[in-house]
Amino acid sequence: MISSVKELEYAALEIRKNLLKLCSIQAIHIGGDLSVADIMTILWQYQMNYVPSDISNESRDRFVLSKGHASAVTSFNQAAIGCFSAEDVIREYATDGGRFSMHSCNLVNPYVEVSTGSLGHGFPIACGMAAGLRLKGNCRSRVYVVMGDGEQSEGSIWEAAMNAAHYKLGNLVAFVDFNGLESDGTIDAVTGLGNIAEKYRAFGWNVQECNGNSMAELKAQMDSLPSADSDQPTVLICHTVKGKGVSFMENQVKWHAGRITEEQYQQALTELTVAFSKRWGEC
Amino acid sequence: MGEKANIFLRDVIGGYMTELGKNAGVVVVNADLAGTCRNRGFVEKYPERSFNVGIAEQNMISFAAGLAHEGFMPFAFSMAPFISMRACEQCRTDVAYGNLNVRMIAPYAGCSGGISGATHWGMEDCAIMASMPNMVVLEPCDPIQAKKMMDKMLDHDGPIYLRCGVEPVKPIYGEDYQYEIGKATLARSGDDGAFICSGIAVKYALEAAERIKEQEGKDIRVVDMHTIKPIDRCAIISAAQTGRIIVAQDHNVIGGLGQQVAEVLAEEGIGTKFKNVGIKDEFVAMAHAPYLYHQFELDTDGLTKKMMDMLT
């Protein structure tokens, strides 16, 4: 188990390198994968109680990817904890007979609790799972759900937000990957979300905000979560940068999805490793 | 006094939830229609296993899917149009895709909602729900069948959509009735023609067959196709041997039981006289359900006339 900020940042670096390798082979949702990479790394490689060899264990934490298109970054994190290898993901992603779909699918990947892809679905399902855990008397497991910011436009998000507070689902921890961009442009240009934190607060949630690309801040948030048997759901509004870590992708709408050239791949790898080395010394 | 009180399937089904509640895994999820769907008995008896998400059918189905992921068997209640259309994608992607044990219980099937108007009619629900992989689609016609159907639901692995009308029904089967999902029931024997039907149409078909027997001496079979999907092909092939088939269902004629039966006949290469009776692919103004059934020739008069025409 890795636990220091440096180790976690290194783990996130490895995730990003894998994402870019895959992106050099075929188009993936690279922008959102990179913005949410730190969140996913801390969840899968630090926070969650989840053992790949025992995936039906009742005491495990549950994970739901509501922004189902971030399947590549999820798969690489699952690889990092031993579900399979990163090479498996690179080889089989979006291939005929492969285990890794462009949207998380548990028909082929048993480490996916809930198949997702259509937005606004994972979050309400996660609420039902959290209620189910309570009903079973499981007061230790949490349900972690990761949403996009554009996804907040779905009405079903707010139906679920209302409900989670009503049923006092303190075992539910939601993340909003707030990178400010969606498929058609900036969130503000498409349909602004206003003050998303205030909205969740008004719905009765414990709302926290942090830099979602800062491992130190994410770790501090994870270490101070209310206990799973508390009675208020938590949402973490994570301010992130779409395409984080790769200069030509950062904050670019066009890098919602795409494929990079070998040259771009080499440039991106260099940028990522140089940035890490600057912070922590040689990899 | 004297006359027996009307029997309504939603009373039977909602009420029977207190029996099913003896199984600890059974939970109920409502979307503000616990009263309409008559499951308040369960809610009062098992409050800890009852959820009400408010007027949010999409959330109801997703929430139920989440409960099913955790091993429960949720019964989600709302009107047929709201489950099959408002929450269509949730039924398909959150429930059917995961092959989860959610039971969607949908009164207001067909135009039984009558004077509420088309907003409250589930006249496309079989077409929608049957087209989802893994989904079983059921429609009971009498109280005993409804209860036995619900008992069988406990043992089935995968999602089930149950539709029922809100018009009064007649008891058709006795306590010894044997029910099996996917196996049609022969409600009346006969070899001169056959009605294949479900739900309220079974009552009308039985009355029509009785009239035809009295008037013409002909024996008309009534096949109760309570399982719309998976359909009982053998029962259809057997009925076709009578040479005359009329399918009747309170559903749009497009995408309902009639087209499913026709497909089986075509695939089997069977030629027979055939009629598909139901809502005639049109929106019509609100009216009481019996009036509508008469207009659509789905009631006893209509079915009698159609079969008589076929006999001559």
Image: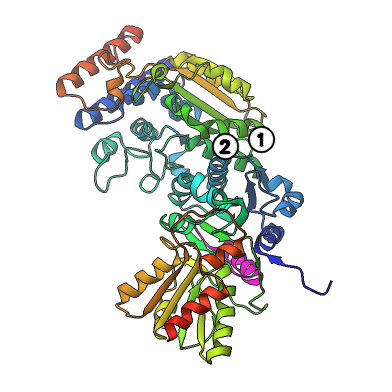
Residue A266 falls within the magenta-colored stretch: no
Q: Are marks 2 and 1 in contact (CB under 8 Å)?
A: yes
Chain where mark 2 sits: A
Give how far across and how far down residue B117 sits, in percent: 57, 51
Estimate how packed mark 1 is, as few (under 14), some (14 to 19) or many (20 or more) residues with alpha carbons within 10 Å: some
Q: Chain of mark 1?
A: A
Q: Amino acid at mark 1?
A: Tyr
In the image, taking residue A23 as reference, residue B22 lies left or right, namely: right
Read off the residue under disc 1: A167
Coordinates of residue B267 in the picture (x, y in percent): 31, 72
User: Which mark, by number, is residue A257?
Assistant: none
Magenta segment, which residues?
B141-159
Q: Examine the rendered structure and indicate whether residue B30 appears above or below residue A240.
A: below
Task: Give the residue pinned by disc 2.
Answer: A127
| Foreground of the two, B56 or B230 | B56
- Residue A129 lies in quadrant: top right
Q: Main secondary structure of the magenta part?
A: helix
In the image shown, does A239 or B135 lie closer to the viewer? Answer: B135
SS at mark 1? loop
Circle 2: residue type: Cys
Quadrant in which the C terminus of chain B appears: bottom left
